[in-house]
Amino acid sequence: MTLRMYNTLTRKKEEFVPLEPGKVKMYVCGPTVYNYIHIGNGRPVIFFDVVRRFLESQNYEVTYITNFTDVDDKMIRKAEEMATTVPELAETFIAAFLEDIQALGVHEATLNPRVTENIQEIIDFIAALVEKDYAYEARGDVYYRTTKFAEYGKLSQQNLEELQYGIRIEVDDRKENPQDFVLWKAAKPGEIYWDSPWGQGRPGWHIECSAMVRKYLGETIDIHGGGQDLTFPHHECEIAQTEAVTGHPMANYWLHNAFLNIDNEKMSKSLGNGILIRDLVKQIKPEVFRFFMLSAHYRNPLNFSDESLKQAANALERIQNANDNLKHRLATASVASEVEADLKDRVAAIANQFVEKMNDDFNTPDAITAVFDLVAEANLYLQQERVNAAALQVFLDQLQVFDQTLGILSKQADELLDEEIENLIVERTEARKSKNWARADEIRDLLTEKGIFLEDTPQGIRWRRK
């Protein structure tokens, strides 16, 4: 099976051929750390985590870089509002970001470089652009000369004349052309700054990623990703900067996820409909939000609503219950014999279906369908009075393999019941034996209030926490 992915640069699905066999260099633009991340930020964070996990499941060694923009205009303004410094602000929100994505089950990046740690590399990159006449200095600012890069607009597939209608252009007599963008910004009084050949200042947004990609991954990388809002201008400008200096493609594959809407409206500050990740995970299980994000193809818009979350929670519960029921039966199964060839074949066919769908441009909704096919097979098997421990393990192992890519199963360790709850379960069992149904129901209700749900199975009572 061959992995194919939709390349924004060519507007078609292409077979993935890494620069180096068995290895993948991948860069995903990270946050500007001036606030907590909202659920819209969660889509690229979760999707590209799944891309990375799937590549690793296919035995690729992935170097996964996502950066922190820890200095820019927004950060300077926010630091002033909070009466703190830009570095202190960055520390606060970098820690918050890492905490939030950990809650979402996102694996730690290979490296999280910061802009402020790479100022010299950025200055050197700008200097190379100036030397090649792709950039010019104007009263302490340095601008990129877009008209000199013949392929400017190739990612967004627009030419300069078309692009000018999509750019918020401020009248600036320092620019040779309105479409030229800033590489180095002269510092205003009281602002954070670094010394450079063009005076005191700080980097522009686009140049930061170009410099860090080249430093940590090389002149050409395999995959560059981010939300579709980054296609233009950010990624377009990255290409122009990098390829002007190196003469090589910046990335062979460009991946962009679509937007997340809230109740069929675009998330925006003016509507005040943004929801922070850290607030959401206090109300629902993080795995539910992750499952919801993967329930639609990454290139399709996704609508967030109470109803869609409820559907995600119900669907995920079916998978989680199957996993838990398999573990429960495995703990009491006394038989461990050779697994029937037919069962092995059915599980293998479902496993192949999962990989086939993920190989088709990371089609997570269809991959999840394969997970449900496995759950259906497992539930059918669990209906038997006598089960084979080895067969139960086959189902469990395959669910774990799927979850290594999707990351949707609960990671909570099995918890010991405290003495009070243990005693209540024993008492309820005795009440049922003596046909004291009223007391049995009373105890069930009491345990439910404590967040303990009981399931009466042919193999005995099984419990789970809410």
Image (cartoon, rainbow, N blue to C red):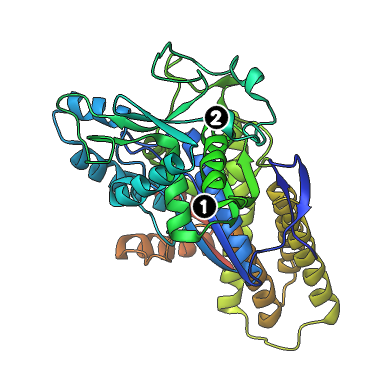
Q: Out of 10 and 390, give the one closest to the viewer.
A: 10
Q: Out of 204 and 449, give the one closest to the viewer.
A: 204
Crowdedness near tag 1: few (<14), some (14–19) or many (≥20) residues, C-alpha within 10 Å: many
In the displayed structure, 97 sits above or below 339; it is above
Give the mark nearest the N terminus, 1 or 2.
Answer: 1
- List x then y, in percent, for residue 300: 69, 35
Furthest-right residue in this view: 342
Crowdedness near tag 2: few (<14), some (14–19) or many (≥20) residues, C-alpha within 10 Å: many
Q: Out of 304 and 284, give the one closest to the viewer.
A: 304
Mark 1 residue type:
Tyr
Q: Is residue 436 left or right of residue 16?
A: left
Q: Residue at x 43, y 57 (%)?
A: 215
Q: Is residue 340 visible?
A: yes
Residue denoted by label 2? 146
Residue denoted by label 1? 27
Determine whether the residue tagged by mark 1 lies in a helix, strand or loop: strand
- List x then y, in percent, for residue 266: 55, 21
Q: How far separated are the C-alphas under marks 1 and 2?
A: 24 Å
